[in-house]
Image: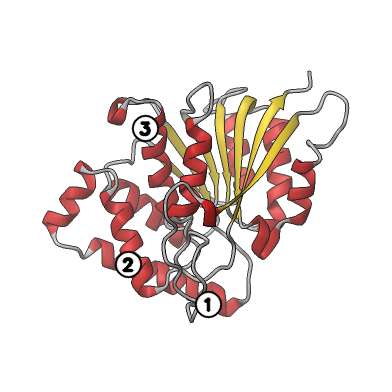
Amino acid sequence: MSHQYHPDFEQMVAERAAGLHQHILALPADQQATFQSDPKALPAAIEAYARENRVPMLFGPAKMAQAAAALAAMPVPPRILVEFGAYVGYSALRWVTLLEEVNKGGGDADVHVYTFELDPAKAQIARDFAKAAGRASQITVLEGPGDVSLSKLVTDGVLPPGSVDVVFIDHWEPRYKPDLQLCESLGVLRVGSLIVADNTDYPGAPDYVAYVKNGGSGEPGAIKFETTSYDADTAPEPPQKRIGGRFGGPGRPGGGGFGGSPSKIVEVTKVVSLGS
């Protein structure tokens, strides 16, 4: 994911991402072999390191449980997910497995995650983790601004109209609303598509929340939305113990992450009408 916070925070995030990368690639060969045989092994290894080393900005198990319940309830099982904010690729790994599960196809399910990351170093980490997990054919990491990357996928015919089942927004909060509107204007959404947005409570994306709660732009012919705010503290599975405050000091339980953000809300928005 690509936030724009205080430079000290950005440096800390980069350093801990690099430390995570080095740790995973240095694990014993027998453990790395399990990453390809067990789809949950690499995410679990990332989580373990994140807890011990206070790696922030991961979409943790409690929040993922809320999102998983929403995806499982979709009448048409989702296969294609677009993610704004790859960070180290942890959530992309979780999303691929979840997409397979809701399609009840396991590794045979034809699913794909397209994830966008502004920072070249983090984009490479995400690619390395996708390869380590045997997911390189199912996870495409695009380096650069999310709006540019999505537009290119559409222009190149990779994402035809109505092809995106789920959008996960977890990058820089001021971009949440514009990037959702870009999804609308590019025509990649369908009736029933879900948009899952993290950190809408903290650091906060008030214009995005107001937009989806209003049902969209309200203009004639525009897409109409319905939205629900889910609290990760009431997730279907027990939330992980939170480690850390601002940069990883004392924090509070709940929230579903690993590095100290007090965010605990997941905004899940459904396309109810294309407006045409």
Q: Which residue is mark 1?
A: 245
Q: Is residue 85 above or below residue 121?
A: above
Q: Is residue 150 above or below residue 14?
A: above
Residue kind at label 2, given as amino acid type: Tyr
- For the point 61% across and 57% down, the residue is 199
Residue receiving disc 2 = 49
Up-down relation of residue 188 to residue 268 (above or below):
above
**Residue at position x 28%, y 46% in the image:** 133
- Residue most toward the left? 30
Q: Position of residue 210 (x, y in %)?
A: 79, 48
Residue 98 or residue 178, whichever sits in front: 98
Who is closer to the viewer here, 149 or 203? 203
Kindly state the secondary structure of the residue where label 1 is placed.
loop
Task: Please give the name of the residue rendered at 58% of the width and 67% of the height, measured from the top-left corner.
Answer: 262
Q: Dot 1, how many residues are within 10 Å of its Cα: few (below 14), some (14-19), or many (20+)?
A: some
The x and y percentages for residue 168 are: 56, 44
2 or 1: tag closer to the N-terminus: 2
Mark 3 = which residue?
101
Q: Nearer the viewer, mark 2 or mark 1?
A: 1
Query: At 30% across and 55% down in the image, what residue appears?
Result: 44
Place of residue 99 in the rendered image (x, y in percent of width and height, measured from the top left): 42, 33
